[in-house]
Amino acid sequence: MFRFGRRAYSTAKPLFPTKTIRSLLSDSPQSNVTLRGWVRSVRQQKQLSFATINDGSTLKGIQVILNDAASASRLSTGACVELHGRLTDSPGKEQQKELQVDSVKVLGECDSTYPLQKKRHTLEFMRTINHLRSRANTGSAVLRIRHAAGEGLQKFYSDQEFIQVNTPLLTSSDCEGGGEVFNVAPSDFFKKPVYLTVSGQLHAEIMATSMGRVYTFGPVFRAEESMTSRHLAEFWMAEAEMAFIDELDQLLDVTEASIQQTTLHVMDKCLDDLTFFNQWVDKRLLDRLRTSVDKPFVRMTYTEAIDTLQRSKKTFQFPTTWGSSLQSEHERYLASDDCCGRPVFVTDYPKELKPFYMRENPDGKTVGCFDLLIPGIGELVGGSMREDRYDVLQQKMKAANMNCEDYQWYLDLRKYGSAPHGGYGIGFERLMLWLTGLDNVREVVPIPRWVGHCKY
């Protein structure tokens, strides 16, 4: 029992007057049950009427049975209703429980222009009515899996004693150095150019050099004029930074564990939703997810990856010579059944291909970094050991034509008690593609923004 002011709150006291459908489906039969939700469908017969009600808590919803024709006539697809009645075991195989309705109250009427009827709608059509997308099976299943994936990631970090930190959305630095940033106006407010962040990494390193293990989970922004199924202007990243790791394999171990444990968490929490996607979107989804948590991820160097691509019998559009970037077609092949058949780490890329902050390897040609490639999607995670030597980092920044004065704070982290450290970032929407089998990131974010599109 907690006490705040004059009121006492018991942890056992329910805070809401009605249970969710998810809870009701696991309850024992009982009378005097109140149910609130939205009507998915209505089917009227001579003596009985049936309706399916959903409140977003579960994929299946619950069937309700109405004996009164007048009450049934008040229900229409899309309406928001409150129903009272008796919860009973269902004789049907598709549902566990059903509600025998005694009374109906319409909380919000729905007219005949409601666009979601009892039929399959295309993903493209649903994107045109984004404000109603989560009322359909695909949209609501995405949101439940998205919640479970975020919960799983944060549980993993908590279990491993990471501290969650909040990095700024407004920043004066371009972490990746690519220049594809959104400028924030008016610029005279801060008296210098300011951008929407493309990554929280550099700021997370501040906290990692005092707290040891930190992570940040939030939105980032890229002004890429890309119309591909893999890019958004606003998306979410989970980024982790760890001090006191001095080998790339340690970083790979943490990354692999975070993906596997998050996948397991989603499989435990959202099996019905995953089964739905396995049936309607990707019939290999569940097998692929199970394989990814049962077997270790493959590990190969960039040099080994180039050799594998060159020895393959597949014809690629882009060259596969040492020193060239791995394109999406290369990444997908390496993780495909024709090659590794499961997630694969590609490590130690040529230093010319990677940003200034990655630690140079002893060979002088490569940096201690990795990309995690997953089947059907390509890159999911990118990470590296961070350059922790002051002189080397300063030299790399000058070579990249960076203004060292603007980044003196970043150099100071190497000047005042530097520590070996590394980190990685997970593209959360791409993780959602992995977990759902969908093939477009616009389907797995609640309200997507991409070039030329910022509705709502």
Image (cartoon, helix red, strand yellow):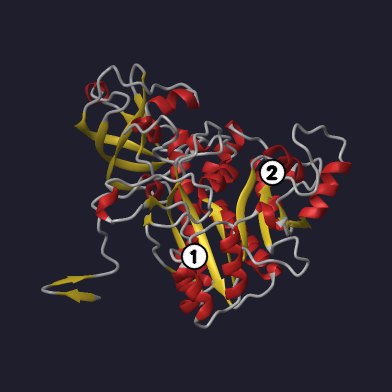
Q: Residue furthest bottom?
A: 417
What numbered label is drawn on residue 163? none
For label 1, count other residues whose C-alpha is less than 10 Å away and answer few (under 14), some (14-19) or many (20+): some
Q: Nearer the viewer, residue 63 or 182?
A: 182
Give the vertical position of 91 relative to 12 (above or below): above
Q: Nearer the viewer, residue 174 or 332?
A: 174
Question: At 74% from the left edge and 45% from the top edge, which residue is drawn?
Answer: 324
- Left or right: 267, with 455 as reference point: right
Precedes in sequence: disc 2 or disc 1: 2
The amino acid at mark 1 is Cys
Residue 384, percent from left and from top: 63, 63
Question: Circle 2 is placed at which residue position?
Answer: 375
Question: Circle 1 is placed at which residue position?
Answer: 404
Residue 274, percent from left and from top: 56, 43
Question: At 27% from the left edge and 60% from the top edge, which residue is drawn?
Answer: 14
Residue at disc 1, secondary structure: loop
Question: At 57% from the left edge and 69% from the top edge, which residue is drawn?
Answer: 394
Residue 382, percent from left and from top: 61, 55
Give the vertical position of 216 relative to 176 (above or below): below
